[in-house]
């Protein structure tokens, strides 16, 4: 994709920036803001070259603390660039630019081949290509007939860097990517777990399906309701009748004899002949336990037990 | 736009966090749906089993045959039998205690609607009157 942002050349003698750049701006740094080294080393990938970059600048930089490195390949050799983001940010602030306004940072060395003519830096210095290395020289050293060129948007290199966190961020890019990766991993676990729910009821469904295949008439919920209301009422009523008869049969023991029994749809009545008063008493207790009404028949030990169904 | 770019890292983490929250919510919804679906399915299955059991008992097509067997457990002279379709009126007379027990147990185990059951004892013999439908 073509870079549509303005490319601003940053040099020490530049004027204060008055433009606001609401959509951001790309900047190109002159060698005043970086230290460059060109090496022919047997590495294949940029990340490998970047790993050894700090050791290449040992002794070259006053203090390696805070430096970052940019590496790119130039024909057979690797170009290593050491830059200090904080110093650059500080300079930009002095010139009225906020670090967050900067979209991408490029280095003049990246477009060394485009330097067919010198680029004037203010009134005293100029940027020239000396044997493939972009260098700041006094304008006095230039040939008087040499026409200067300008750095334009069309010269924007493909690869650039960005300020980490663009100044205000509390997280570094590395930290934020790591944290985001962990969160996304957990999110993926939850998604997978969530999608796995749903198969547990399959066994119940299969069992139900098998039952419905055997009883196709029960597939309709209306039919089920109608059958349930019909049989449930019968079942409840008939079970109660049988439970009552069973309870009454437990009241037959030595000294207690069933004299008569009558059961219909709504009530039951049983008369027991008891051998003596203690048997009557025991029978009364048993009837009470079953919540039946028990009445002693006058002038005898017989007991009448009755109730409603 | 510039301000958003200034907080790009926080936005990345924020977006990932949002994704996590959405995934968690998705999982919870799925768990809840699963629970409800399982519970509903289990209840329906239980109802269905219950219904089938009820139908097997009270809707059995062999009830008539089962009822007919009641007649044969006592000697024919002791039983008066009147069955019309799915309604029965029967009376058993002169039953000894053993026969009385057998008749009562059989009646209790028949899947019929007892409309009337009367039993009386005179000395050592019992008499049973039974009316039912199915």
Image (tube, coloured by chain):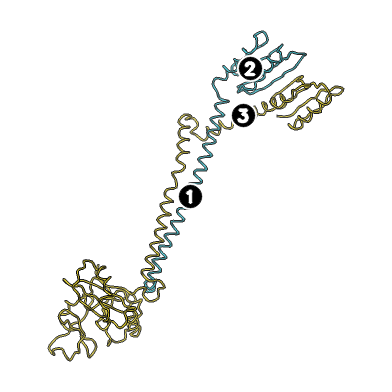
Quarter of the rendering containing residue A175: bottom left
User: Which sits in the foreground, A219 or A103?
Assistant: A103
| Nearer the camera: disc 1 or disc 3 | 1
Seen as rendered, the residue at the extreme top is: B77
Q: Colour of chain B?
A: cyan
Question: Which residue carries the number 3 mark?
Answer: A235
Q: Find residue B108 and report its horizontal and vertical position in percent.
A: 65, 22
Q: Residues within 10 Å of mark 3 (few under 14, many from 20)?
A: some
Question: Which residue carries the number 1 mark?
Answer: B31
- Asked if A171 appears above or below B128 in the picture, the reply is below
Q: Colour of chain A?
A: yellow
Could you tell me which residue is drawn at 55 percent across and 28 percent down? B55
Q: Is residue B132 left or right of residue B62?
A: right
Q: Quadrant of the C terminus of chain A?
A: top right
Could you tell me which residue is drawn at 44 percent across and 47 percent down? A197
Distance CA(mark 1)–CA(mark 2): 56 Å
């Amino acid at each position: 994709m073509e870079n549509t942002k303005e490319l601003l050349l940053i040099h020490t003698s530049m004027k204060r920036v008055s433009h606001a750049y609401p959509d951001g701006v790309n900047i190109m740094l002159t060698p005043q803001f970086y230290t460059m080294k060109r090496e022919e080393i047997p590495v294949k990938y940029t990340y490998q070259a970047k790993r050894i970059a700090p050791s290449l600048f040992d002794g070259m930089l006053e203090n390696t603390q805070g430096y970052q490195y940019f590496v790119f390949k130039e024909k057979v050799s690797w170009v290593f660039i050491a830059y200090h983001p904080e110093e650059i940010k500080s300079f930009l602030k002095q010139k009225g630019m906020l670090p967050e306004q900067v979209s991408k940072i490029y280095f003049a060395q990246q477009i060394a081949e485009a330097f067919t003519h010198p680029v004037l830096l203010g009134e005293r210095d100029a940027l020239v290509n000396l044997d493939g290395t972009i260098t700041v020289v006094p304008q006095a050293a230039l040939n008087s007939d040499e026409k200067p060129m300008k750095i334009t948007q069309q010269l924007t290199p493909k690869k650039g860097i960005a300020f980490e966190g663009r100044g205000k961020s509390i997280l570094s890019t590395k930290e934020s990517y790591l944290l985001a990766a962990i969160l996304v991993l957990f999110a993926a676990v939850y998604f997978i777990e969530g999608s796995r729910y749903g198969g547990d009821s399959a066994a119940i469904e299969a069992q139900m399906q098998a039952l419905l295949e055997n009883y196709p008439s029960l597939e309709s919920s209306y039919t089920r309701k109608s059958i349930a209301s019909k049989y449930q009422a019968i079942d409840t009523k008939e079970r109660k009748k049988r439970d009552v008869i069973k309870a009454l049969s437990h009241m037959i023991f030595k000294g207690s004899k069933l004299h008569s029994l009558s059961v219909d749809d709504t009530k039951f009545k049983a008369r027991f002949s008891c051998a003596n008063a203690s048997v009557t008493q025991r029978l009364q207790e048993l009837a009470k336990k079953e919540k039946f009404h028990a009445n002693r028949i006058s002038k005898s030990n017989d007991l009448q037990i009755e109730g409603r169904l | 736009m510039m301000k958003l770019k200034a907080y790009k890292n926080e936005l990345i983490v924020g977006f990932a966090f949002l994704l996590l929250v959405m995934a968690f919510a998705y999982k919870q919804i799925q768990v809840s749906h699963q629970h409800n679906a399982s519970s509903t399915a289990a209840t329906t299955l239980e109802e269905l089993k219950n219904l089938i059991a009820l139908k097997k008992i009270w809707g059995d097509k062999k009830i008539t045959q089962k009822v007919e067997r009641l007649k044969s457990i006592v000697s024919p002279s002791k039983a008066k039998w009147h069955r019309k379709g799915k309604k029965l009126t029967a009376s058993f007379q002169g039953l000894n205690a053993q026969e009385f027990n057998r008749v009562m147990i059989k009646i209790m185990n028949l899947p019929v609607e007892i409309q009337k059951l009367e039993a009386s004892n005179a000395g050592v013999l019992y008499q049973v009157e039974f009316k039912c439908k199915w």
